Image (cartoon, helix red, strand yellow):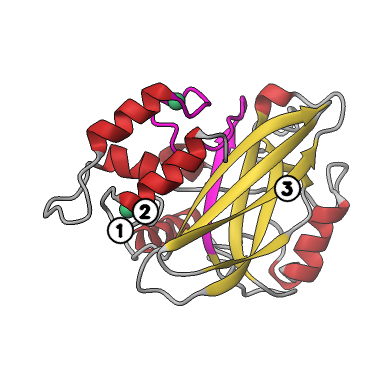
Amino acid sequence: MVRDLIDLYPDNFAVVEYHVYDEYETIWGLDRAEQFYDWLPGGVPWFSYDGVGNVGSHEVYETALLTQLNRPTSMTLSVGAKPIGNDEYEVTIRGCMEPGFEARTVTAYAVAVQVHWPPEISYARNTFRTAASTKDIFVEPDSCNKVMRVITFKPGWDVTDMKLIVWLQDRGSTYPLVVHQAAQTDYPFSPLPKYGDYTNDGEVSLDDFEAFDACFIGPDSVIDSPSICLDAFDVDKDKDLDLVDFARFQQAIGGAT
Ligand SMILES: [Ca+2]
Ligand SMILES: [Ca+2]
């Protein structure tokens, strides 16, 4: 079954399951199924693979997934979330484009699914619960852009069983529209790491300054900085730590995010 792939590829495979024409249907899910994916000719279940169509059985789907995993990645995506009120979460979606690809505007989606629900349907996985409003973002090669969305849970939902799934998809109102990347995070949700927070304690402070100092190589170095340094400090993504990065770090340690 396609759902088995969730367990086989937990880091590479994000699935949203919509119920239609039963008591678990939602307006958003129905609209997605009928208007966006026009699934009716295909019957149920119907799978959209990377936003481009139905690939049928588990075996075919797994082959398609492996083929896709071997293709060069054009965009990367990360997701973080923090509570901002009762049952309300601010979701940060950060999309980046690898060098050598064409700049494009894509639509950022953020949805909440419940991992094991409804309980009486044993095969149900990642069932759609609610969505944030969508937002278009423009991403250029070798750079990143981020958007914030708000997702609201209904009282009574089992928060500990919730998962946030986000994806970047070509703009439009009907498929096929390519999904360029997806990301997911289980409860408890964590905010995205802050720029400059090498020690990952939620603030940019003296310990991070010491780390920057140890990581600093300078613009003329013939070796690349270690990736752990680059992840925390390399703001211009040129694979070394130089004065450009230091200027940004000074802002961060001064309180800018
Ligand atoms: Ca820190
Ligand atoms: Ca740099």
Identity, as a three-letter code, of the amino acid under mark 1: Asp
Q: Is residue 113 left or right of residue 197?
A: right
Mark nearer the viewer, 1 or 3:
1
Q: Residue at x 50, y 38 (%)?
A: 252
Report the residue marked by disc 3.
Answer: 149
- Mark 2 and mark 3 lie on one chain; the one further toward the N terminus is 3
Q: CA distance from mark 1 to mark 2?
A: 10 Å
- Mark 1 and mark 2 lie on one chain; the one further toward the N terminus is 1
Neighbour tally class for label 3: few under 14, some 14-19, many 20 plus, Cα within 10 Å: some
Q: CA distance from mark 1 to mark 3?
A: 29 Å
Report if the beta carbon of the residue with label 1 is closer than 8 angstroms to ligand 2: yes
Q: Is residue 142 left or right of residue 214?
A: right
Q: Residue at x 77, y 41 (%)?
A: 151
Query: Looking at the image, is 112 positioned above or below residue 134?
Result: above
Badge count: 3
- Is 203 one of the magenta-colored residues? yes
Q: Residue at x 64, y 40 (%)?
A: 164
Mark nearer the viewer, 2 or 3:
2
| Residue 175 percent across, percent down from the top left | 67, 73
Report the residue marked by disc 1.
Answer: 238
Circles 1 and 2 in contact, beta carbons < 8 Å = yes
Q: Is residue 62 left or right of residue 114?
A: left
- What main secondary structure does the magenta stretch of the protein show? loop
Residue 123 visible: no
Report if the beta carbon of the residue with label 2 is closer than 8 angstroms to ligand 2: yes
Secondary structure state at the residue bearing disc 3:
strand
Secondary structure state at the residue bearing disc 2:
helix
Secondary structure state at the residue bearing disc 1:
loop
Query: Looking at the image, is 40 positioned above or below residue 255?
Result: below
Mark linked to residue 244: 2
Q: CA distance from mark 2 to mark 3?
A: 30 Å
